[in-house]
Image: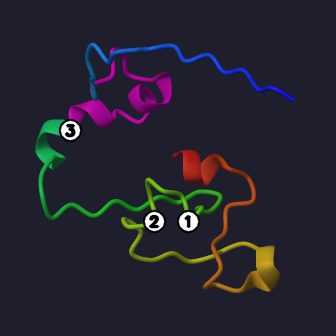
Amino acid sequence: MERKMRLYPYQVIAETETASEIPKGVELIQAPKVWDKTKGSGITIAILDTGCDITHPDLKEQIIGGKNFTGDDQSNPDIYKDYNGHGTHV
């Protein structure tokens, strides 16, 4: 069987890391009011949510700990796996 493949050339024109709008939830907790005061080194962030995928490529080198406060995993405090997906998304 002959396999055919098409290759479409592309070029990255620009990359950006800034958001064009602030999500409503971020506005609701009034986060923009403190951003100028909290940016910089030495800042620790805590997320209290449904758990965390500690193998996620964007997170695995950044997580310094966690604790399970649910009945998941027989309430083992050291297993804070995210079965919901929301905590990892946050």
Numbered badge on residue 35:
3
Which residue is found at the position 15% from the left and 46% from the top? 39
User: What is the x, y in percent for residue 80?
Assistant: 63, 73
Q: Is residue 79 above or below residue 84?
A: below
Cα distance between the residues tagged 1 and 2: 5 Å
Q: Which residue corresponds to mark 2?
A: 60
Q: Is residue 29 above or below residue 67?
A: above
Cα distance between the residues tagged 2 and 3: 25 Å
User: What is the x, y in percent for residue 67?
Assistant: 56, 77
Residue 75 occupies quadrant? bottom right
Q: Which tag is nearer the camera, tag 1 or tag 3? A: 1
Q: Which residue corresponds to mark 1?
A: 55
Q: Earlier in the sequence, mark 2 or mark 3?
A: 3
- Which segment is the magenta one? 18-33
User: What is the x, y in percent for residue 83?
Assistant: 75, 59
Q: Is residue 71 visible?
A: no
Determine whether, in the image, residue 27 is placed left or right of residue 80.
left
Which residue is found at the position 56% from the left and 45% from the top? 89
For badge 2, the amino acid type reads Lys
User: What is the x, y in percent for residue 41?
Assistant: 12, 59
Q: Are marks 1 and 3 in contact (CB under 8 Å)?
A: no
Q: Are marks 1 and 2 in contact (CB under 8 Å)?
A: yes
Numbered badge on residue 29:
none
Determine whether, in the image, residue 54 is placed left or right of residue 13.
right
Q: Is residue 70 above or below residue 36?
A: below
Q: Earlier in the sequence, mark 1 or mark 3?
A: 3
Cα distance between the residues tagged 1 and 3: 28 Å
Please identify the residue farthest to the right as the structure is shown.
Answer: 1
Which residue is found at the position 76% from the left and 26% from the top? 3
Q: Which tag is nearer the camera, tag 2 or tag 3? A: 2
Q: Are marks 2 and 3 in contact (CB under 8 Å)?
A: no
